[in-house]
Image: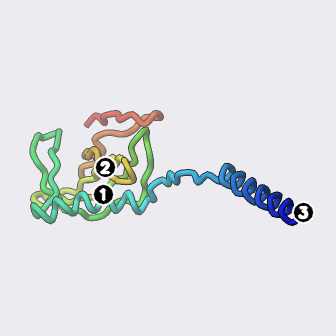
Amino acid sequence: MLNTMKNRFFLLATGLSVLGFLLYRPMPVLAEPTPEDLRSAIRQYVGAEEQSKGFFSVVDPKTGTARKLKLERVHERVGKTGNYYYSCADLKDVETGDLLDLDFDVSEANSELKVADVRIHKDNGNPRYTYDANDNRVPVQS
């Protein structure tokens, strides 16, 4: 009788262990990057180029010239459109003193954030484009 009770206890314990294993399956954590993660990725991207060249460079599509810029600040607002996160930053042209508002698109792959695209959105507060209701860029006529 003692052996029968031990066998029943063993079977019950084994069954509960298997059931627990089947019911508890850890789910992968797919956390979105925080707004500070995105702002930090932009700061690091700009900062790396500033450190190596002394400035951040972006080609101005309006003039075809490379603008030499220094980071003033990354905006607080961040968002996501399609597959990209985005934020803006103010950078000052070291040669002209112009203040440019750049848009940064940031991609995420394998928990790593990378700047995918940079565009001049505003030049001294004058927008070069805006967005429609579907987040498409619409040029602003000057």
- Residue at (26%, 64%) from the top-left corner? 72
Position of 107 relative to 20 (above/below): above
Quadrant of the rendered image containing residue 139: top left
SS of the residue at dot 3?
Answer: loop
The three-letter code of the residue at mark 3 reads Met
Whether the residues at callouts 2 and 1 have beta carbons within 8 Å, the answer is: yes
Going by the picture, which residue comes out furthest to the right?
Answer: 1
The residue wearing badge 1 is: 42
Query: How far is the residue under mark 2 from the one under mark 1?
Result: 7 Å
Residue 25 screen position, x and y as percent: 61, 51
Decide: marks 3, 2 in contact (CB < 8 A)?
no
| Residue 141: % across, % down | 28, 34
Q: Secondary structure at mark 1?
A: helix
Which numbered mark, 3 or 2, is in the foreground of this view? 3
Which dot, 1 or 3, sits closer to the camera?
3
Relative horizontal placement of residue 58, taking residue 20 as reference (left or right): left
Q: Earlier in the sequence, mark 2 or mark 1?
A: 1
**Dot 2 lies on which element?**
strand
3 or 2: tag closer to the N-terminus: 3
**Crowd class of label 3 (few under 14; some 14 to 19; many from 20; radius 10 Å):** few
Left or right position of 11 against 54:
right
Q: Amino acid at mark 2?
A: Phe
Determine whether, in the image, residue 113 is placed left or right of residue 124.
right
In this figure, which residue is indicated by the disc labeled 3? 1
